[in-house]
């Protein structure tokens, strides 16, 4: 991602955060102030009704009650040995462990011991990646199942000669509709019935849970009246499927945005190439109309005839020697001319040919030949072996 794009995205997120802060402050601050005034009125009323109670002692008692409620205590129950309404029975503890690895963290039940907090650190470090792998697998399988079912519906639409573009739009809408029906609307009515919530409270809990926000003001199974040990584990399995569905939806949206980005880049590249071609054409036409602007080229000097080749003297051999066969190449090559010391006979034989052709380049004078060394006498042959015949040269 480019730096300018990253800065623009950061500015957009900050602007979104500031706008959300202003809206939430305008909506919630008056309610907070009213709740604080109500608490003060209740305290004064209690002190007037019980003049023997000190105001400082009453404040300490309220703090103790708040801490006990935060620790999971039930103000309607006086028994401390009843584990059916405990916040740490097996079902509630399973649900709490599920909120750790799903990173929801409602906060209605918190750890109060140092040993529990230390165990929670290592439990979260291992459980969160493990749940991420499970979530990816379940989301892939769930998305494949939904797309396979929607594929049959697409085939029906194509048999009805519906345009493919419209079929794609309808299939995407159907995918979202089925997911919302299974994981949003159906649980909303279930929680309305089980928790005695309003429809707004139920759908608020569903969205806050599936987006892993988890404020904790509404938690399924936190009501002491829900004494079924299997209720909260079932809620956790619904959270697993719902998160997997939302993960598949986000993956589909990301793939769609990636395809759109590639098409946009390809179109922009094509427009850039067309603009460059048009600019080159216009520049060429303007140059042709304006005439040549290049400086005139200098005239080349006339070619002079090659100098005459000097006459070569004829050298006589100093002593007679048997004739020796000299191999001459058929045509001169550049390698022989470049290295004359390797083939002096070729230069001697090709001098007449070069003089007949005009001798474009002057030839170096030939040196005197070295006399051939005398031959060694042949070794005597055996009596039974015939003498080798002399090969004429």
Image (spheres, helix red, strand yellow):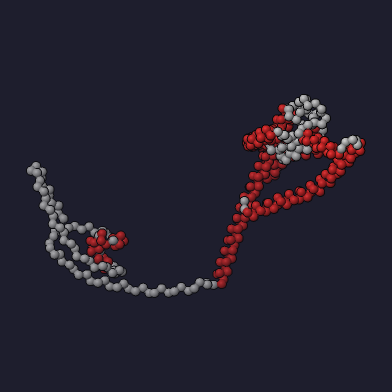
* Residue 164 visible in this rendered orientation of the protein: no
Residue found at x 59% / y 63%: 279
Instruction: From the top left corner, tell me how far across and down residue 100 is, in percent.
Output: 69, 35
Name which residue lies at 14% across and 52% down: 391
Q: Nearer the viewer, residue 3 or 356?
A: 3
User: Foreground: 212 or 312?
Assistant: 212
Q: Residue at x 72, y 27 (%)?
A: 90
* Image side of residue 198 versus residue 354, left or right: right
- Say left or right for 185 vs 4: right
243 or 46, nearer to the observer: 46
Quadrant location of the C terminus in the rendered image:
bottom left
Is residue 50 in sight in this rendering?
Answer: yes
Q: Nearer the viewer, residue 315 or 54?
A: 54
Location of residue 123 in the rendering, given as x and y in whole percent from the top left corner: 65, 34
* Count of numbered badges drawn on the protein: 0
In which image quadrant can residue 371 be found?
Answer: bottom left
The picture places residue 103, in percent across and down from the top left corner, at 69, 38
Quadrant in the picture for residue 142 = top right
Write down the quadrant of residue 290 in the picture: bottom right
* Image coordinates for residue 28, horizontal then vertical, percent: 81, 45
Residue for point 25% across, 61% down:
341
Q: Pick out the residue farthest to the right.
A: 49
């Amino acid at each position: 991602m480019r730096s300018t794009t990253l800065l623009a995205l950061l500015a957009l997120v900050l602007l979104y955060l500031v706008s959300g802060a202003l809206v939430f402050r305008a909506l919630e601050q008056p309610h907070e102030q009213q709740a604080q005034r109500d608490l003060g009125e209740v305290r004064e009323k209690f002190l007037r009704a019980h003049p023997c109670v000190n105001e400082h002692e009453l404040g300490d008692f309220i703090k103790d009650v708040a801490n006990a409620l935060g620790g999971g205590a039930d103000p309607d129950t006086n028994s401390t040995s009843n584990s059916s309404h405990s916040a740490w029975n097996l079902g509630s503890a399973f649900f709490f462990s599920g909120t750790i690895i799903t990173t929801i963290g409602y906060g209605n039940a918190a750890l109060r011991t140092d040993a529990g907090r230390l165990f929670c650190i290592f439990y979260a470090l291992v459980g969160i990646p493990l749940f991420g792998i499970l979530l990816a697998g379940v989301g892939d399988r769930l998305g494949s199942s939904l797309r396979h079912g929607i594929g049959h519906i697409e085939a029906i639409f194509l048999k009805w000669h519906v345009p493919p573009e419209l079929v794609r739009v309808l299939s995407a809408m159907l995918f979202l509709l089925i997911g919302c029906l299974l994981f949003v609307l159906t649980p909303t009515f279930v929680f309305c019935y089980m928790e005695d919530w309003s429809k707004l409270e139920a759908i608020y809990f569903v969205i806050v849970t599936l987006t892993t926000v988890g404020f904790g003001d509404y938690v399924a199974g936190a009501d002491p009246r829900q004494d079924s040990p299997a209720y909260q584990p079932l809620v956790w399995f619904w959270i697993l499927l719902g998160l997997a569905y939302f993960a598949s939806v986000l993956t589909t949206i990301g793939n769609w945005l990636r395809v759109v980005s590639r098409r946009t880049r390809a179109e922009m590249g094509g427009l850039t190439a067309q603009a460059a071609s048009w600019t080159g054409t216009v520049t060429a036409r303007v140059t042709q109309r304006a005439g040549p602007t290049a400086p005139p080229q200098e005239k080349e000097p006339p070619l002079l005839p090659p100098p005459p080749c000097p006459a070569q003297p004829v050298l006589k051999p100093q002593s007679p020697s048997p004739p020796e066969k000299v191999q001459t190449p058929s045509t001169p090559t550049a390698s022989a001319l470049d290295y004359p010391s390797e083939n002096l006979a070729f230069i001697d034989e090709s001098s007449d040919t070069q003089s007949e052709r005009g001798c474009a380049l002057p030839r170096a004078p030939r040196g005197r030949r070295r006399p051939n060394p005398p031959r060694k006498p042949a070794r005597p042959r055996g009596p039974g072996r015939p003498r080798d015949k002399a090969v004429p040269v």
